[in-house]
Amino acid sequence: MEIKHNFSSPFAFFKNTDLLPELRKYIHSQNIEGIESQTARHVKKNLKESKFNLFQSDEIIIKNTMKFAAQSLGKFLNELHQEYCHYDISFNDSWFHIGSKNSVHEVHLHPLCSWCGIYYVDSGDTEDGDTVFCSPVQRNHIDFGTRYLDAKNQERIKPENGLLVLFPAYLAHFQSLYTGNTDRIVVAFNISVHGPI
């Protein structure tokens, strides 16, 4: 007998804490109120969200953050595709969240892109509020024979200052309840890859 587990989903993890002091300063200086993106407001509780054009800023710290994201995705794709090249990519959307006490971002997908990223600028002051990814394997029946799916029904990522997580856009995900007293700050983005350069 041979057993194979197919349909796995790749994640990549990078770390960069050098950007954080200036990035925090820039984000706090924006003084946003509410959901400025005007997108899916009903799934966001106790969150402030910028417009989806963060990486269009000419500020040096934003340019450096975008460069870090692009270089990280390039390394990831080189490893996945077993090639060495640069890629023509576009950041379709880029934004930041500021989550206050008892903030949540319910289950959602990011459309019209192939890859997404979450960069934790400030993870806050509690251990909760994980980013939770849902398995893309959908069950049409639950019984004793499907127990093997339970172990990988979700993937939980603990927020950590300076951690960048890259993941496929087809993965539904959510931010679980964050109960901290200090703000949690996250930068996020959606990427399309047009081909090698």
Image: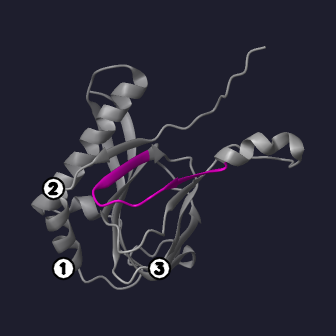
Residue at 37% x, 26% y is: 79
Amino acid under disc 2? Asp
**Colour convention of the picture:** one colour
Q: Nearer the viewer, mark 3 or mark 1?
A: 3
Percent of width and height locating residue 30: 22, 78
Earlier sequence position, callout 1 versus callout 2: 2
Residue 81 in the image: x percent, y percent? 41, 23
Front in this rendered view, residue 148 or 183: 148
Work out how far the residue at label 1 is from the one at label 2, CA to CA, in angstroms. 19 Å
Q: Position of residue 58 (x, y in %)?
A: 13, 61
What residue type is disc 1 on? Ser
At numbered mark 2, what does the secondary structure look like: helix, strand or loop?
loop
Disc number for residue 29 = 1
Assess disc 2: are there few (<14), some (14-19) or many (≥20) residues with their C-alpha within 10 Å of its C-alpha.
few
Residue at horizontal 40%, vertical 61%?
159
Considering only vertical position in the picture, is 14 above or below 34? Answer: above
Quadrant showing the C terminus: top left
Q: Is residue 154 left or right of residue 75?
A: right
Query: CA separation, marks 3 and 1?
Result: 24 Å
The residue carrying mark 2 is 18
Q: Nearer the viewer, residue 125 or 149?
A: 125
Query: In this figure, which residue is indicated by the disc labeled 3?
Result: 179
Are there few (<14), some (14-19), or many (20+) residues within 10 Å of tag 1?
A: few
Q: For the residue labelled by badge 1, is the local secondary structure a helix, a strand or a loop?
A: helix
Q: Is residue 6 toward the left or the right of residue 30 in the image?
A: right
